[in-house]
Amino acid sequence: MSFLLRLPAALPAVLFLSGEEGGNAAKFLGLPLWVWQILNLVLFFAVLLYFVARPMTEAFRKRQREIEERRIEAEKQRAAVRELSSEIRERTSRLEREIEEVRRQGLAEGESARAALSARAKEEAERVLQGSQEEIARRLAAAKEELRQVAADLTASAGTEIVSREITAEDRHRLLSESVEKMKAAR
C-alpha cells in the first residue's frame, strides 16, 4: 500500500529513463511507448488495488471484528469465571463454617452422651452394688440361721446324749409322773 503512495513521486524518474533516444521512439496508436507502459503500470496497480487491496482490507477488517468479538466474549467469560470463582469461594467458606458448626455440635453431643453414659454407668454400678449387698445380707442371714439351726441341733443332740447318760430310770419315772400330773391339773 505504501508503494502506491510513492508511485506519483517515481513517475517522473520512469519517464526520464524511458525517454526518446535519438529521434526514433517507438509508438503505438500514435502515442509513445513509454506512455503506454505508464498507463499499463497504473492500470495494473488499479486492478491490484481493486482485486487485492480491497478484499485484503475487508478481510483484515472482518478479522479485526472477529478478534474484537472474541475479546468481548473472552471478557464476558472471564467475568463469568470471576463470578463463579467468587461463588465457589463463598460456598466453600459457607461449607467450612457449616462443617465447623457440625464439629462443635458433634463434640457437644459427644460430651453430653458421655456424661449421660457415665451417669447411667454410675447408677447401674450403684444398683448392682446395692443388689449385691442385699444378696450378701440375705445369704449371711440364711447362713447365720443355718448355723444357729446346726448349733441348736448339735446342742440338742449333745444335750440329749448328756441327759440320756446322766438320767437314770428313776429320774425318767419321776419326770413322767410330774408331766402327767401337770396335764391333769391343766385340765
Image (cartoon, rainbow, N blue to C red):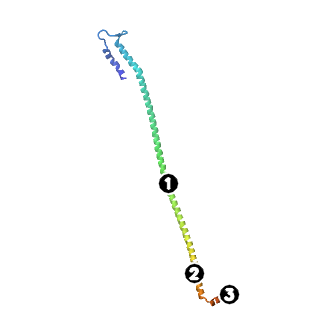
Amino acid type, label 3 = Val
| Mark 3–mark 1 CB contact (< 8 Å) | no
Q: Residue furthest left?
A: 22
User: Would you call the spot at circle 1 few (<14 residues within 10 Å), some (14-19), or many (20 or more)?
Assistant: few
Residue 141 percent location from the top left of the image: 57, 74
Residue 54 percent location from the top left of the image: 42, 22
Q: Residue at x 49, y 51 (%)?
A: 102
User: Which residue was labeled with disc 1?
Assistant: 106
In the visual, does 35 lie left or right of 101?
A: left
Front position among marks 2 and 1: 2
User: Which residue was labeled with disc 2?
Assistant: 154
N-term-proximal mark, 2 vs 1: 1
Residue 98 numbered tag: none
Q: Residue at x 47, y 49 (%)?
A: 97
Q: Is residue 9 above or below residue 72?
A: above
- Count of numbered tags: 3
Viewport quadrant of the N terminus: top left
Amino acid type, label 1 = Gly
Q: Residue at x 44, y 30 (%)?
A: 66
Q: Residue at x 51, y 58 (%)?
A: 113
